């Protein structure tokens, strides 16, 4: 079954841009890093509760790193969705008029 009608063109396969794939791969790497950091924070936290006081600093550092990794993961995945056309780019904002209601008249 080919294209029908006089103006019907050949169908092309929908392709995901390479940039979207690269962003998606970066998001997956950031997600794997987040999983490792959360696991490490749990491990250091449990050993710190066992009496090793220096592990509290490591557990805190791992927690902050996990927060940063999850933030980067979300940002990369949202950007990949925008590049692939899955998520819409927000419309530009209208320019603001300065001076309030009186100046707008």
Image (cartoon, rainbow, N blue to C red):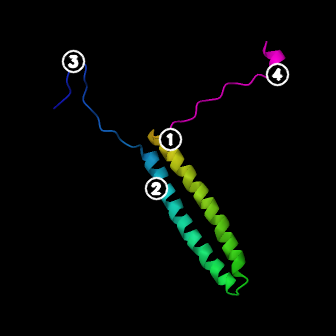
Give the secondary structure at mark 1: helix
**Residue 54, magenta (yes or no):** no
Q: Which mark is residue 95?
A: none
Q: Of label 3 and label 4, which has the lower sequence position?
A: 3
- Crowding around mark 3 (Cα neighbors within 10 Å: few <14, some 14 to 19, many 20+) is few
Residue at x-position 53% and y-position 46%? 78
Residue at x-position 25% and y-position 19%? 7
Of the two numbered discs 3 and 4 in the rendering, the one whose residue sits closer to the viewer: 4
In the rendered view of the protein, which quadrant contains the C terminus? Answer: top right
- Alpha carbons under labels 3 and 1: distance apart: 34 Å
Give the secondary structure at mark 3: loop
Circles 2, 1 touching at the beta carbon (< 8 Å)? no
Taking 98 as reference, is 25 above or below it? below
**Residue 98, magenta (yes or no):** yes
Q: Which residues are magenta?
A: 88-105
- Crowding around mark 2 (Cα neighbors within 10 Å: few <14, some 14 to 19, many 20+) is some
Rendered location of residue 61, percent (x, y): 68, 70
Q: Which residue is mark 1?
A: 82
Q: Of label 1 and label 4, which has the lower sequence position?
A: 1
In the rendered view of the protein, which quadrant contains the N terminus? Answer: top left
Q: Of label 2 and label 3, which has the lower sequence position?
A: 3
Q: Which residue is mark 3?
A: 6
Q: Which mark is residue 100?
A: 4
Circles 1, 4 touching at the beta carbon (< 8 Å)? no
Q: Of label 2 and label 4, which has the lower sequence position?
A: 2
**63 with respect to 7 (left or right):** right
**55 with respect to 77 (left or right):** right
Q: Of label 2 and label 1, which has the lower sequence position?
A: 2
Rendered location of residue 93, percent (x, y): 65, 28
């Amino acid at each position: 079954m080919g294209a029908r009608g006089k103006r019907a063109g050949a169908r092309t396969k929908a392709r995901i841009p390479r940039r979207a794939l690269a962003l998606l791969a970066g998001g997956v790497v950031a997600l794997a890093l987040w999983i490792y950091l959360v696991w490490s924070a749990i491990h250091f936290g449990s050993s710190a509760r066992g009496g090793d006081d220096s592990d509290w600093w490591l557990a805190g550092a791992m927690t902050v790193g996990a927060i940063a990794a999850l933030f980067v993961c979300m940002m990369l995945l949202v950007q990949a969705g925008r590049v692939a056309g899955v998520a819409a780019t927000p419309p530009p904002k209208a320019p603001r008029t300065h001076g309030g209601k009186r100046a707008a008249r």
